């Protein structure tokens, strides 16, 4: 019976110290020993398994090496060693495994990649991230990590021969200028390249990577000169570029990257001028660029849908940003304390139809825009839907201002409750999650489809907003959206029993909080909500 066995899965056999003798399993095709944390030896008979195609040894923490016979596996296509924290050495005859397509060896103790790797003509996926970590991570405290030398992973001087390679991930391998293969730009089949977390003074030219779609160069201490040398702006297929956490002050124009959709420049703290951007860019992340003063013209960027510019305190203007309002899904500018009032009003006054539909808009500020009809201090506002609206109400635009008075890192979802006191219905939505814990004022604006609530003319409605105990909602505003031409996507919404909301006996007065009606700005004076988890939330 064992002679016919094709798959052997002994995963998570925590007390297995040695693999079985494979001489009685001649037809084995897949060997899975994932998570065998005591495994320290693989039996040498594994080299006789002529049909073995997959070996998964992920998270075998005690395994240091493979038997010398392992290189005899001519049929092996996938070898997974990721998480083998003590694994130090790949066989020097690695190149003899001619069928190998996938080699995953992240978070190991490997110090050297054998030169024979260039003989692997079929290799498509090579992941070696995290090779600079010490093998016994549990022993290394944050103090000792500063004293122990970082391991330098040695690569062969050339990677020519890896004609089929599609993915090369060498993040956090402590690579330097001298240890980086100079001909990496000749890997003509490469589609994804991750060099993040290495310290380079310069990089080889990457201009020959005509199929490259994904490039990560974050946290590499790159300067303007190093970026120039890569010639990355000539990559015709690039659609994702991560240059975050680097030292350059400026960048060459990226407008020639016609396929680029996502650009990450987060925490480039010396960057003072954003480069010219490709018109097809969809996502721009530039949080924490504290020196940023100048932005390019956004007028032609008709596909931009995601913009993060948090904590760019020197930024004043964003030319042409209003032209992107029809495609914008998400915008965050908390901490942009010097942004001009013109930019702020342009964003909020237009309502940024699409942005409000999704995660919403985050801007610095302390006041609800004047065009909101129903406004109140605190986290709740009440109103009656005008009779002439009938069934034409498309959505509610909700705007709040809030600040934070605690450094809590708990879940900070914006929670919105919409209670219809006429139809005795209530709903709960969490459309967005603030990412910042900052004390200064923030404006959030979002749009909620009426398909969820079915509000009609004459309905008495209460809208309440909370974040969590460390946030204070200072003001709230609601506006009714009647324009049927605006596309409004409904959020995930939970219907709650109306009985969860208890109104006080004194709350029988007219429900009006329309801006300008000073005598009736509050509606019901109190209510309390008891959630299914037993937490009581009070709004006053």
Image (cartoon, rainbow, N blue to C red):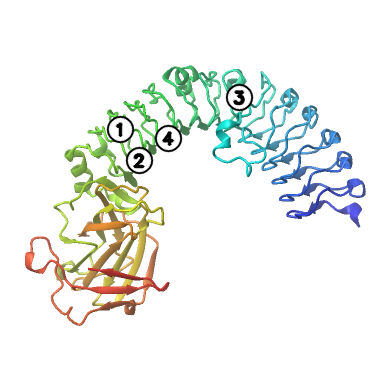
- Name the disc covering residue 308, or none: 2
Residue 490 makes an appearance in the image: no
Q: CA distance from mark 2 to mark 3?
A: 33 Å
Where residue 459 sits, quadrant-wise, is bottom left
Mark in front: 4 vs 3? 4
- The total of numbered circles placed on residues is 4
> Is the C-beta separation of discs 2 and 3 under 8 Å?
no
User: Does the CB distance between marks 4 and 3 fall below 8 Å?
Assistant: no
Q: Residue at x 26, y 61 (%)?
A: 394
Secondary structure of the residue carrying tag 1 is loop
Say the numbered circle drawn on residue 188.
3
Q: Residue at x 34, y 77 (%)?
A: 500
Q: Quadrant of the N terminus?
A: bottom right
Q: CA distance from mark 1 to mark 2?
A: 18 Å
Calculate the distance from the C-alpha at mark 1 to the C-alpha at mark 3: 32 Å
Q: CA distance from mark 4 to mark 2?
A: 9 Å
Q: Quadrant of residue 327?
A: top left
- Mark nearer the N terminus (4 vs 3): 3
> Split into 4 quadrants, where in the image is the C terminus?
bottom left
Distance of label 4 from label 1 (alpha carbons): 20 Å
- How far from the left and from the top, in percent, is residue 223? 44, 21
For label 1, the residue is 300
> Residue reaching furthest bottom?
505
The residue mark sitting in front, 2 or 3, is 2
Density class for disc 3 (Cα within 10 Å; few <14, some 14-19, many ≥20) is some
């Amino acid at each position: 019976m064992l002679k016919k066995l094709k798959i052997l899965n002994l995963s998570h056999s925590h007390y297995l110290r040695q693999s079985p003798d494979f001489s009685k399993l001649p037809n084995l095709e897949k060997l899975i020993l994932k998570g065998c944390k005591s495994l320290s030896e693989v039996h040498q008979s594994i080299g006789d398994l002529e049909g073995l195609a997959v070996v998964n040894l992920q998270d075998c923490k005690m395994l240091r090496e493979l038997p010398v016979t392992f290189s005899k596996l001519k049929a092996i296509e996938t070898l997974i060693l990721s998480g083998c924290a003590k694994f130090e050495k790949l066989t020097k005859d690695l190149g003899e495994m001619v069928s190998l397509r996938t080699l995953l060896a992240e978070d190991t103790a490997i110090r050297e990649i054998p030169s024979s790797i260039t003989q692997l003509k079929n290799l498509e996926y090579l992941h070696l991230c995290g090779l600079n970590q010490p093998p016994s991570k549990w022993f290394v405290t944050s103090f000792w990590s500063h004293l122990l030398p970082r391991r330098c992973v040695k690569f062969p001087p050339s990677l020519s021969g890896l004609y089929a390679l599609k993915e090369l991930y060498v993040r956090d391998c402590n690579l330097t200028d001298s240890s980086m293969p100079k001909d990496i730009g000749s890997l003509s089949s490469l589609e994804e390249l991750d060099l993040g977390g290495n310290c380079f003074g310069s990089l080889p030219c990457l201009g020959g990577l005509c199929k490259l779609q994904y490039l990560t160069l974050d946290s590499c201490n790159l300067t303007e000169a190093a970026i120039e040398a890569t010639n990355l702006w000539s990559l015709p297929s690039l659609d994702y570029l991560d240059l975050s956490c680097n030292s350059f002050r400026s960048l060459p124009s990226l407008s020639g990257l016609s396929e680029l959709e996502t650009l990450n420049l987060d925490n480039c703290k010396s960057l003072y001028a954003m480069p010219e951007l490709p018109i097809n860019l969809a996502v721009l992340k530039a949080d924490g660029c504290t020196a940023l003063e100048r932005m390019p013209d956004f007028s032609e960027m008709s596909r931009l849908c995601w913009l993060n510019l948090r904590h760019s305190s020197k930024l004043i203007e964003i030319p042409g940003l209003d032209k992107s309002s029809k495609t914008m899904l998400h915008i965050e500018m908390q901490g942009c304390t010097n942004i001009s009032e013109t930019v702020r009003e342009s964003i909020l006054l237009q309502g940024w139809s699409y942005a409000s539909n999704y995660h919403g808009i985050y801007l610095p500020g302390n006041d609800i825009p004047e065009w909101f009809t129903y406004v109140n201090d605190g986290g709740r506002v009440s109103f009656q839907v005008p009779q002439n609206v009938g069934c034409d109400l498309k959505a509610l635009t909700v705007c709040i201002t809030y600040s934070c008075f605690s450094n809590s890192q708990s879940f900070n979802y914006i929670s919105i409750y919409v209670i219809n006191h006429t139809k005795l219905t209530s709903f709960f939505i969490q459309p967005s999650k603030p990412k910042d814990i900052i004390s200064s004022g923030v404006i959030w604006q979002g749009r909620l489809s009426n398909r969820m609530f079915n509000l009609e003319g004459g309905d008495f409605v209460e809208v309440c907003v909370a974040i969590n105990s460390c946030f204070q909602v200072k003001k709230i505003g609601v506006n009714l959206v009647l324009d049927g031409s605006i596309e409004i996507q409904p959020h995930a919404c939970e219907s709650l029993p109306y009985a969860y909301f208890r109104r006080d006996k004194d709350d029988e007065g007219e429900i009006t909080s329309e801006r300008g009606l000073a005598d009736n700005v509050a509606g019901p004076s109190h209510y309390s909500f008891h959630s299914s988890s037993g937490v009581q939330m009070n709004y006053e």
